[in-house]
Image (cartoon, rainbow, N blue to C red):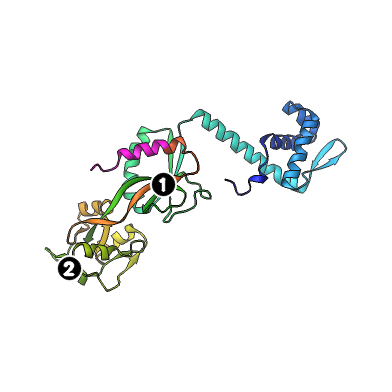
């Protein structure tokens, strides 16, 4: 819902205002819009009353824009133009359009981006626009149709499509961790932390029945930066398997010790619950289900 809904004028009032401003009289505007002069005058009076400002100064039969009217008419023309363009685009491509998606950096880069070519091939009518957001936001004030969310079902006002749990693996640069290292051996090494997963190492240690590390380590805000720190020998990192996989395949990182385990939450696709999903989002939801790991 718009914050200033009561100030939203009707389309007929805006068309009457724009025509009268351009033509300089209610009579000429009426002829252009196939209305009566009195109908145009009523629309202009209603518009001025609604916004609480005088838009025209009457000089005989001529209508002259006030300073407020001159400023307002430019914005009205822009709105009418964009609305008309959007309507044409919707009619020309009713099942397509843009999908504005907020993503988490690591998931977007390492899991979603490599698969988007498949979506583009299956749905050439949809343009996917990606922007990074690290935390939940209000869909009512942000220009997004949907978002990738990690954690729990705690995004206010959102519907959810579960994607996958986050499985992590301990990795390090070759040579940092001795061969045949046991999980307990890692407690003596520098451990790297992600600020949004403050208890990741404690959970990993608990899964391997060893005490949690007590010494602090370097903290990062993104998995990609933490992975690079691990590659350069700064410590052992817990990375999601989809982030670690290319580095393990290239040999830049090696498994440190122990087995992988589930992290603190799951990945979801979320979208606003209070408005209908556009066709582009419906297509994306159906497609992403085909990309999920099968049990």
**Mark 1 nearby-residue class (10 Å; few <14, some 14–19, many ≥20):** many
Q: Is residue 242 above or below residue 82?
A: below
Q: Is residue 287 magenta?
A: yes
Q: Position of residue 36 (x, y in %)?
A: 78, 28
- Provide the residue designation for mark 2: 184
Residue extending farthest to the right is 60
Residue 20 located left or right of residue 158: right
Q: Is residue 172 above or below residue 84?
A: below
Of residues 19 and 257, the one nearer the viewer is: 257
Q: Is residue 93 magenta?
A: no
The label on residue 270 is: 1
Residue 10 picture quarter: top right
Residue 113 located left or right of residue 167: right
Which segment did they paint magenta?
A: 282-295
Quadrant for the C terminus in the image: top left
Q: Who's the residue at 26% across and 60% down the image?
A: 238
Q: Are marks 1 and 2 in contact (CB under 8 Å)?
A: no
The label on residue 288 is: none
Q: Position of residue 143 (x, y in %)?
A: 50, 47
């Amino acid at each position: 819902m718009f914050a200033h809904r009561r100030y939203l004028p009707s389309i007929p009032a805006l068309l009457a205002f724009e025509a009268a401003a351009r033509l300089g009289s209610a009579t000429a505007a009426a002829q252009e819009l196939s209305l009566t002069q009195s109908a145009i005058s009523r629309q202009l009076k209603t518009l001025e009353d609604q916004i609480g400002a005088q838009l025209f100064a009457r000089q005989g039969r001529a209508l002259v824009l006030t300073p407020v009217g001159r400023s307002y008419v430019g914005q009205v023309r822009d709105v009418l133009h964009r609305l008309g363009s959007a309507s044409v685009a919707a009619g020309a491509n009713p099942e397509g359009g843009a999908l504005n998606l907020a993503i988490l950096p690591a998931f977007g880069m390492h899991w979603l981006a490599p698969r988007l070519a498949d979506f583009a091939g299956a749905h050439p009518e949809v343009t996917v626009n990606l922007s990074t957001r690290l935390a939940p936001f209000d869909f009512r004030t942000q220009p997004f149709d949907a978002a990738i969310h990690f954690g729990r079902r705690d995004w206010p006002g959102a519907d959810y499509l579960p994607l996958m749990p986050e499985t992590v693996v301990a990795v390090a640069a070759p040579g940092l961790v001795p061969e045949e290292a046991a999980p307990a051996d890692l407690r003596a090494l520098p451990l790297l932390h992600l600020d949004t997963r403050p208890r990741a190492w404690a959970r990993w240690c608990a899964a391997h029945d060893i005490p949690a590390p007590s010494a602090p380590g370097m903290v990062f805000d993104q998995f990609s930066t933490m992975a690079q720190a691990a590659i350069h020998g700064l410590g052992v990192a817990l990375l999601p398997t989809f982030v670690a996989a290319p580095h393990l395949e290239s040999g830049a990182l090696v498994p440190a010790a122990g087995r992988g385990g589930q992290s603190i939450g799951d990945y979801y696709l979320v979208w606003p619950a209070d408005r209908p999903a556009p066709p582009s989002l419906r297509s994306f939801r159906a497609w992403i289900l085909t990309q999920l790991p099968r049990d």
